[in-house]
Image (cartoon, grey):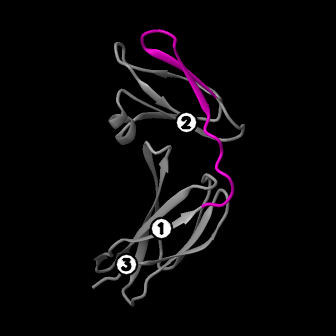
């Protein structure tokens, strides 16, 4: 039986988490697959995937958001197959940034100008869909470090926007 890998949180800060991965077995490990999950504004679950080569590993994941819960899951790729998943949870330190104030204005039947307030020198994600279910499961999205963006939409549809 292949055991799950051990994930140990080494350290965390406002915008990063460092963790180590190891196996408690003599089975040869060729690498790990790690997923980092977080929920954006209770509507959208985000995920970042890392594919890591080698047996032992310490990883640092940067560009995270302050005071946000993250779930890290991992499995090992071994000579006998994939291991079961293991999970850890961590909340980054600091104060979570205030939510931006979004305004969306139709320019014409297929373009919407979105603008918002918020801090400079950060990356914003703009998500939009025709229903709450689509907004949660598979929204259209774009990223920018600006405070506005024009998105193209289908005519004769109503859209929900989130930044």
Q: Which mark is residue 112?
A: none
Q: For marks 2 and 1, give the CA distance.
A: 26 Å
User: Which circle, 2 or 1, is nearer the viewer?
Assistant: 2
Residue 20 within the segment the image draws in magenta: no
Q: Position of residue 132 (x, y in %)?
A: 36, 34
Q: For marks 3 and 1, give the CA distance.
A: 15 Å
Q: Which residue is labeled 1 in the image?
A: 52
**Dot 3 lies on which element?**
loop
Task: Judge left or right: residue 78 versus residue 55.
Answer: left
Q: Earlier in the sequence, mark 3 or mark 1?
A: 3
Q: Earlier in the sequence, mark 2 or mark 1?
A: 1
Give the residue displayed 43% in from the left and 27% down from the top.
160
Q: Is residue 30 above or below residue 150?
A: below
**Dot 2 lies on which element?**
strand
Task: Judge left or right: residue 119 versus residue 114.
Answer: right
Question: In the figure, residue 13 lies in which quadrant?
Answer: bottom right
Q: Which residue is labeled 3 in the image?
A: 4
Answer whether labels 3 and 2 touch (C-beta < 8 Å).
Answer: no
Task: Give the extent of the magenta segment.
Answer: 92-116
Q: How many neighbours does mark 1 have within 10 angstroms: few (below 14), some (14-19), or many (20 or more)?
A: some
Task: Judge left or right: residue 128 versus residue 11.
Answer: left
Q: Is residue 103 above or below residue 2?
A: above
Q: Position of residue 105 (x, y in %)?
A: 53, 16
Q: Which residue is labeled 2 in the image?
A: 143
Q: For marks 3 and 2, give the CA distance.
A: 35 Å
Task: Judge left or right: residue 33 versus residue 67.
Answer: left
Q: Position of residue 36 (x, y in %)?
A: 48, 59
Question: In the figure, residue 109 lies in which quadrant?
Answer: top left
């Amino acid at each position: 039986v292949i055991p799950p890998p051990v994930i140990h949180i080494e350290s965390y800060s406002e915008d990063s988490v460092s963790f180590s991965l190891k196996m408690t077995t003599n089975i040869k490990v060729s690498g790990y697959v790690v997923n980092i999950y977080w929920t954006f504004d209770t509507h959208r679950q985000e995920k970042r995937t890392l594919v890591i080569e080698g047996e032992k590993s310490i990883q640092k994941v940067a560009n995270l958001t302050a005071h946000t819960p993250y779930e890290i899951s991992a499995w090992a790729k071994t000579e006998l197959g994939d291991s079961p998943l293991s999970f850890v949870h961590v909340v980054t330190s600091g104060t979570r940034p205030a939510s931006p104030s979004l305004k969306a204005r139709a320019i014409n039947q297929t373009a919407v100008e979105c603008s918002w307030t918020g801090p400079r020198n950060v990356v914003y994600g703009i998500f939009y869909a025709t229903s709450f279910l689509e907004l949660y499961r598979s929204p259209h999205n774009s990223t920018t470090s600006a405070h506005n963006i024009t998105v193209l939409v289908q005519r004769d549809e109503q859209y929900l926007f989130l930044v």
